[in-house]
Image: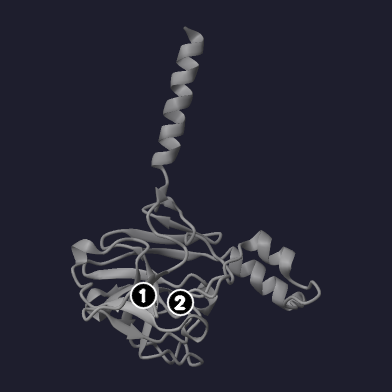
Amino acid sequence: MKKSLVIVFLFLFVIGCEEQRITDLITEESPKTVVMTQDLIAIENQNDGMVRRNLEYSSKDKGKIAVDPKYFNENHMNRGDVIYYKTPLIDKNKYPQLNPPEYNIARVIALPGEQIEIKKGKIYINDKPLDTFYGEALSWGLDEEEYFKSVNKPGSAQCDESCLKTMKEYFNMGMDKIKVPEGHLFVMGDTWWRSIDSQIYGPLPVSSIKGKVLGYVGN
C-alpha cells in the first residue's frame, strides 16, 4: 500500500512539474524551404538578430525569405511564430547608437494578456519558465556552457577578460516583468544581444505586422 502511494505521489509530482512549464513542441528551429505562390511575398533580411548557429533567416547566406501577408488575425497568432513587421519608433535619446531597419523580423514570445519576465537569462511567461529552444539567452545558437567552451580556441572567436565578463552578464541577464496589452505581442530575436525588438521598444502593436515568415524561398 505504501509503495502504491509513493508511486501515485511521484506521478502527481511529475505532472505538477510539467504543468509549471510552458512548452512549444510545434515550432522548428530551422526554417523550411517554401514554394512561392501569388499569395506570398519575398523579402530580404540583412539583420542578424534571428541568426543562429546555422545562419537561419539570413538573406546574405540563405537567400530571400517567404512571407505570408495574411497574418493579421490576432486569434491565429502563436508563440514561436516568426513575423515580419514595421519597426516601431525608438527613443534616440536612450538608444542613440541604434539605427534599425524600417522593417524587421522577430519571434513571437508572449501573447496579449500574458506577463513576460527574464530571470538569469531564462524567459518566464506568467511566472512559468518557457521551456523551448528560444526560451533562453543564446549567442549564435550557443548557450552559456557551449559559448565559453568555444571561445579563445585556435580558429575560433577571441574574447578578452572584458568580453568574457560582458558575455557572462548577458547569459544571466534579467528583464522586469511586463504585461502585454491587448492588440500587442512581445517579440524577440533568437540572438538577443544582436536583436532590436521588444526589449527596446516594448510590446509590438499587431497593426505593425506585415506577415508571417514561412521560410526560405525555394528555387
Residue at 42% in and 92% down = 92
In the image, is 102 to the left or to the right of 162?
A: left
Residue at 49% in and 17% down = 6
Quadrant of the image occupied by residue 196: bottom left
Q: Earlier in the sequence, mark 2 or mark 1?
A: 2
**Disc sitting over residue 202 in the figure:** 1
Above or below, 118 against 151 in this view is: above
Quadrant of the image occupied by residue 39: bottom left
Residue 18 or 124: which is nearer the viewer?
A: 18
Give how far across and how far down residue 96 sits, in percent.
Answer: 48, 92
Give how far across and how far down residue 91 sits, in percent.
Answer: 39, 88
Q: Which amino acid is tagged 2?
A: Tyr
Q: Secondary structure at mark 2?
A: loop
The alpha-carbon separation of the residues under discs 2 and 1 comes to 23 Å
Above or below, 92 against 52 in this view is: below
Quadrant location of the C terminus in the rendered image: bottom left
Residue 192 or 40: which is nearer the viewer?
A: 40
Give how far across and how far down residue 206 sits, in percent.
Answer: 24, 74
Above or below, 9 against 47 in this view is: above
Look at the image and tell me whether residue 170 can be seen.
yes
- Which residue is the site of mark 2? 57
Q: Secondary structure at mark 1?
A: loop
Quadrant of the image occupied by residue 26: bottom left
Q: Which amino acid is tagged 1?
A: Gly
